[in-house]
Image: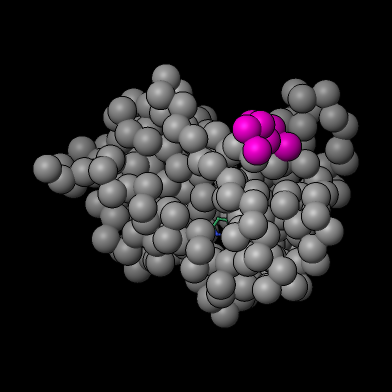
Amino acid sequence: EEHISIAVDGPAGAGKSTVARAVAKRLGLLYVDTGAMYRTVAWLAVRFGVKATDENGLVRLLDEYPVEFRRDATEGTLAVFFQGRDITPELRSPDVSAIVSPLSVHPRVRERLTSIQRDLRKNTGVVMDGRDIGTVVMPDADVKVFLTASLNERARRRAEEFALKGHTVEESEIRDSMAERDERDSSRDIAPLRPAMDAHILDSTGKSIDEVVAQILNWVRECA
Ligand code: C5P
């Protein structure tokens, strides 16, 4: 039996996770947030005082502290467990966000996570979001989407997300750190952020979540 696979890549704050989760739910597929995996390494690095430049130290963290990506059967998403505790909510904190991009340039860190990501699709259909899903992790994906939005809109959405959680963060601050992260992600040597040759480019500026989801579902239907 063939399992469908959908890749959603794009810069920070383009709405990848919201949209990918919704598409997965509609189609009954597993949603895999690969950013959460890079953020897990960053979380471990913060916790154990390993520098983002220390590739050996980061790989050692992954060896010594096995984290578990546990499937939530009702939600169809993955939660990250460390020593029995769900750390998923902590992965979006500013201290984690600050070092995740510098740390994801390391080839051996990427190798580890890429292989976990490929294993996850072995027995199930997936919607996977990240930066290199259509280009590196699943170059054979059935549908590839490169989701973008203007920097201003992405920063505004992220500021709203923080506000909903009760944190006030300056939109200009978010905009600067997003721009810096995108620049770093796009210019690294290994698995840089860029659309696959066969990706659909989807600019979500001014579009609702429902419109974006409907567009992707159309592409999925077309390829079936
Ligand atoms: O998607 P999210 O913003 O959570 O990703 C956090 C960071 O993890 C990105 O800025 C990028 O540096 C890294 N990442 C990556 N490859 C992926 C997913 C995320 O390098 N497939």
**Is any part of residue 206 visible from this angle?**
no
Give the residue displayed 15% in from the left and 45% down from the top: 2
The residue lying at 68 percent from left, 73 percent from top is: 55
The colour scheme used to paint the residues is one colour
Residue 30 in the figure: left or right of residue 91 = left
- Does residue 87 show up magenta in the picture? yes
Estimate the x, y position of residue 3 in percent, counting from the top left. Answer: 21, 43
Residue 182 % position (x, y): 66, 62
Q: Give the position of the N terminus as an image quadrant.
A: top left
Residue 100 position, x and y percent, is 70, 58
Relative horizontal placement of residue 81, taking residue 19 as reference (left or right)? right
Is 71 on the left-hand or right-hand side of 98?
left
- In the rendered image, the residue lying farthest to the left is 1
Q: Is residue 5 magenta?
A: no
Viewer-closest of 202 and 76: 76
Image vertical order of residue 200 relative to residue 124, above or below: below
Q: Position of residue 57 (x, y in %)?
A: 72, 69
Magenta span covers which residues?
A: 83-90
Task: Please tell me in which quarter of the rendered image ligand 1 is found.
Answer: bottom right
At x 42% / y 47%, what residue is drawn?
Answer: 128
Residue positioned most to the top: 74
